[in-house]
Amino acid sequence: MSTDGLSVDDGIRTLLLLMPRMVGRAKKLGVPAELQSLSLAPRHLSLLAYLLFDGAMTVNELAARLEVAPATVSLMVGELSRKGVLERREDDADRRRTIVSIAQAHQTAINEWLGYGAKAWRQALEPLTPEQRRMFVDTLRAYESALSG
């Protein structure tokens, strides 16, 4: 990794070229055949990614991680449960809570599909210090925020 500085304009030029390439490569991964008929939207991918990497969790935990209202997550979970992608079960410790997980029948396909991107992120982030990783993530958040106006 170079220690040379980069002007803001040079950084913008580089990212304007790089970002579409990244999106294009991510899209080429494609949805696994067994999931194509499920009409998964980008909002579903984030939910599935959290369940894949962090395991089963409650609707409130998912809502906090996705930074949306629990009602929004409940709707998504209901939709994906009806399609057989997710399973819901009562929390043994607190019967008022529902635990959500990826259905065993789709675990392998979702892991192969989303795991590839996680592996690429791991390869990119591991060489960085924790502070550099924080700055990278914060920069992407700032960019996303600026795009949303």
Image (tube, rainbow, N blue to C red):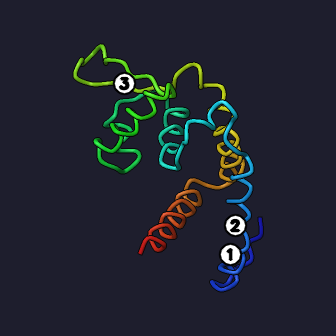
Q: Secondary structure at mark 2?
A: helix
Of the 4 image quadrants, the one containing the N terminus is bottom right
Residue situated furthest right in the rendering? 2
Question: In what quadrant of the picture does the C terminus appear?
Answer: bottom left
- Report how far apart the C-alphas of labels 1 and 2 lie in the structure: 7 Å
Inspect the image, locate mark 2, and give the three-letter code of the amino acid beneath it.
Pro
Residue annotated with mark 2: 20
**In the foreground, 20 or 14:** 20
Q: Nearer the viewer, residue 24 or 35?
A: 35
Q: CA distance from mark 1 to mark 3?
A: 41 Å
Q: Check if mark 1's residue and mark 3's residue have beta carbons within 8 Å.
A: no
| Residue 94 versus residue 116 in the image, above or below | above
- The location of residue 71, given as percent across then percent down, is 28, 42
Asked whether the beta carbons under mark 1 and mark 2 sit within 8 Å of each other, the answer is yes
Could you tell me residue 21's position as x and y percent? 74, 64
Q: Quadrant of residue 140?
A: bottom right
Q: At x 40% / y 39%, what residue is drawn? A: 76
Image height check: is 143 above or below 92?
Answer: below
Q: Tell me the tag on residue 148.
A: none
| The furthest residue to the front | 37
Q: Is 114 displayed left or right of 142 in the figure?
A: right
Residue type at mark 1: give it.
Answer: Leu
Badge 1 element:
helix
* Measured Cα–Cα span from mark 2 to mark 3: 37 Å
Q: Amino acid at mark 3?
A: Ile
Q: Which mark is residue 16?
A: 1
Above or below residue 146? Residue 49 is above
Q: Dot 3, crowdedness within 10 Å: few (<14), some or many (≥20)?
A: some
The picture places residue 88, in percent across and down from the top left corner, at 39, 22
1 or 3: tag closer to the N-terminus? 1
| Crowding near the residue tagged with mark 2, few <14, some 14–19, many ≥20 C-alpha atoms within 10 Å | few
Q: Find disc 3 in the rendering and name its residue.
A: 99
